[in-house]
Image (tube, helix red, strand yellow):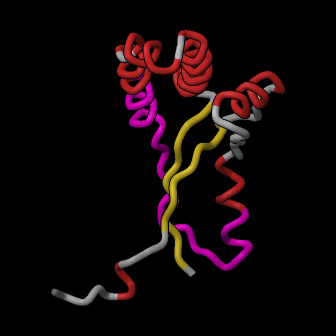
C-alpha cells in the first residue's frame, strides 16, 4: 500500500444549488418535496469559501448527470407502483410520486442543478 501524498487529497462536496432565485412556490415546493430542503445559488460557495481561507480548485455543474439520474430513478420508482401500493397504500404512493416528480421537474427546467466543489486551505 502506498501512502497518499497530502497534496493529492482535497476536500470536496456536492450540493443541490439553484441556478436562479427560487420563487416562493418553488422554495415551498422544494421544502415539501425533500423534507425541508433548501438550495443556495452557486455564488454562495464561490464567495463564502474564499472568505474563510478556502481556495476553490474545481467547481463543476453536475446538472446534466443528475437530471438523467433523477429521471431514471423516477421511472424506476413508478415501475414499482403496484408493490408500493400493496405495501403502503395508494395514498402513500401518490403523495410520494407528486413530491419526487416536483423535485425532478426543478432539474428538468434547470431551476436546480448539482454542483461538485473541491477546495483546499
Image quarter of residue 30? top right
Q: Position of residue 11 (x, y in %)?
A: 48, 72
- Tell me the quadrant of the picture where the N terminus can be found: bottom left
Q: Is residue 51 magenta?
A: yes
Quarter of the picture containing the C terminus is: bottom right
For the residue pair 70 and 97, the one nearer the viewer reads as 97
State whether residue 41 is above or below residue 107.
Answer: below
| Closest to the observer, 41 or 73 | 73
Residue 76 within the segment the image draws in magenta: no
Instruction: Indicate whether 9 appears above or below 115.
Output: below
- Which segment did they paint magenta? 48-71
Q: Nearer the viewer, residue 84 or 41?
A: 84
Instruction: Write the residue at 44% across / 29% down.
Output: 70
Residue 6 x, y percent position in the rendering: 38, 87
Please indicate whether residue 74 sits to the left or right of residue 2 in the image. Answer: right
Residue at point 68% right, 37% down? 35
Name the residue located 53 percent from the left edge and 14 percent from the top edge.
89
Amino acid at each position: 500500500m502506498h501512502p497518499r501524498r497530502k497534496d493529492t487529497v482535497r476536500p470536496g462536496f456536492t450540493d443541490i444549488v439553484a441556478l436562479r432565485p427560487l420563487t416562493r412556490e418553488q422554495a415551498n415546493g422544494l421544502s415539501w418535496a425533500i423534507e425541508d430542503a433548501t438550495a443556495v445559488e452557486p455564488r454562495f460557495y464561490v464567495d463564502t469559501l474564499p472568505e474563510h481561507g478556502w481556495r476553490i480548485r474545481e467547481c463543476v455543474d453536475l446538472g446534466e448527470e443528475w437530471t438523467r439520474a433523477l429521471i431514471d430513478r423516477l421511472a424506476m420508482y413508478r415501475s414499482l407502483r403496484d408493490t408500493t401500493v400493496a405495501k403502503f397504500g395508494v395514498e402513500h404512493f401518490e403523495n410520494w410520486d407528486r413530491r419526487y416528480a416536483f423535485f425532478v421537474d426543478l432539474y428538468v427546467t434547470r431551476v436546480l442543478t448539482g454542483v461538485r466543489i473541491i477546495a483546499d486551505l
